[in-house]
């Protein structure tokens, strides 16, 4: 039974939504441990008191150091101290990264952790990383992101020998800025199943099992994709409900439309892994519903079950030993 520390004070919808999601996840044999104030109504779930909270507008690194008893930091610390197997928060993403670096620390050899998000595509799920942890990156960072993404795709999504592509402005290897040009050379010379560049327009069609980018570009793409999906689904529903004929047709396509909405809804996956740390950490959307929180907790539990951290550590190149001063 995976023990998942849950930041009850993160998220835009309030702790009641998070408690409801944790209760739903418990029904699957997971043990959520809530972190929040003593007065929190946990509806029978275990509570660890954490009187402070980190707000979305707080400066991440400063808040993590100034509020060691916040629900977010305390939940991450529980993993570091072995009291929980994984942590989930829908709170401040930057604070989650800062707390992870401070409390969990990086795996040996990891230059920078990366946010790995599962994007639903026409041919199956696609792992996008980095989706926002590192606004600036070097070519060797992108190579490492690709390696972590490939392990994630194999262990969590069950993809054998996942295809990896580099996000760029064209499929040709000579297209892109200096970062993508140099990253392309490193990826092409690696032992990954690298099949070239891809453009943003092909992500939802299923361009590859793993798509790698710097955090700035990846985050822009992620939000554009999520906004596009949400707008199209809402527009389709509005068109169907606008006329009697549309409503009649809507009854006929309701099963197919429901399946499509379920497949494309970000709540289906619930959150994103923060890969590269010495513990399983999942970042959920700030606006997560109880369903999204439950799925984020399940996602964290799968990471524990599949030993993602240990497998990442085994697959990443060992750090070079420090050389003595001459």
Image: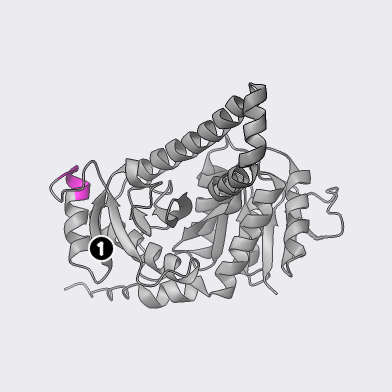
Write the residue at 72% across / 60% down.
Answer: 25
Residue 154: give x, y in percent of width and height: 43, 70
Viewer-closest of 70 and 264: 264
Residue 217: give x, y in percent of width and height: 34, 42
Kind of element beneath mark 1 = strand
Write the residue at 67% across / 37% down.
Answer: 251
Residue 193 magenta: no
Question: Which quadrant does the N terminus fall into?
Answer: bottom right
Residue situated furthest top in the rendering? 243
Q: Quick check: 66 above or below 302?
A: above
Write the residue at 34% across / 66% down.
Answer: 147
In the picture of the structure, the residue carrying the numbered disc 1 is 194
Would residue 251 be found to the left or right of residue 93 on screen? Answer: right
Would residue 210 be found to the left or right of residue 298 on screen? Answer: left
Viewer-closest of 90 and 70: 90
Question: Which quadrant does the C terminus fall into?
Answer: bottom left
Residue 1 shows in the view:
yes
Look at the image and give the residue range highlighted in magenta.
175-180
Residue 50 shows in the view:
no
Write the residue at 42% across / 58% down.
Answer: 113
Viewer-closest of 254 and 325: 254
Would residue 29 be found to the left or right of residue 194 on screen? Answer: right
Residue 219: give x, y in percent of width and height: 42, 42
Would residue 272 be found to the left or right of residue 244 on screen? Answer: left
Q: Residues within 10 Å of mark 1 (few under 14, many from 20)?
A: many
Question: Where, by quadrant of the figure, is residue 2 drawn?
Answer: bottom right
Residue 190: give x, y in percent of width and height: 22, 68
Q: Quick check: 233 above or below 131?
A: above
Tally the marks.
1
């Amino acid at each position: 039974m995976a023990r998942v520390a849950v930041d009850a004070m993160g998220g835009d919808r309030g702790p009641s939504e998070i408690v409801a999601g944790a209760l739903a996840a418990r029904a699957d044999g997971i043990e959520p441990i809530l972190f929040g104030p003593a007065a929190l109504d946990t509806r029978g779930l275990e509570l660890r008191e954490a009187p402070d909270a980190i707000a979305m507008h707080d400066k991440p690194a400063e808040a993590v150091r100034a509020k060691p008893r916040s629900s977010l930091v305390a939940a991450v610390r529980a993993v570091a101290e072995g009291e929980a197997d994984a942590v989930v928060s829908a709170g401040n993403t930057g604070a989650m990264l800062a707390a992870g670096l401070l409390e969990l620390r990086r795996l040996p050899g990891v230059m920078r952790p990366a946010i790995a998000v599962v994007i639903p595509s026409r041919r199956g799920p696609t792992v996008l990383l980095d989706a926002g942890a590192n606004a600036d990156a070097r070519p060797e960072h992108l190579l490492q992101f690709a390696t972590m993404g490939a392990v994630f795709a194999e262990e969590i999504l069950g993809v054998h020998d996942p295809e990896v592509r580099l996000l760029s402005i064209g499929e040709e290897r000579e297209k892109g800025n200096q970062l993508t040009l140099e990253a392309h050379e490193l990826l092409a010379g690696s032992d990954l199943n690298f099949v070239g560049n891809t453009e943003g327009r092909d992500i939802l069609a299923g361009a590859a099992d793993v798509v790698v980018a710097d955090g700035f570009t990846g985050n822009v793409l992620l939000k554009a994709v999520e906004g596009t999906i949400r707008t199209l689904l809402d527009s389709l529903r509005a068109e169907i409900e606008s006329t009697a004929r549309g409503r009649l047709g809507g009854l006929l396509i309701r099963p197919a439309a429901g399946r499509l909405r379920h497949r494309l809804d970000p709540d289906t996956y619930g959150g994103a892994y923060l890969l590269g740390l010495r513990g399983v950490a999942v970042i959920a959307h700030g606006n997560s519903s109880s369903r999204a929180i439950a799925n984020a907790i399940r996602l964290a539990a799968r990471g524990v079950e599949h030993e993602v951290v240990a497998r990442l550590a085994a697959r990443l190149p060992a750090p070079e030993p420090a050389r003595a001063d001459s």
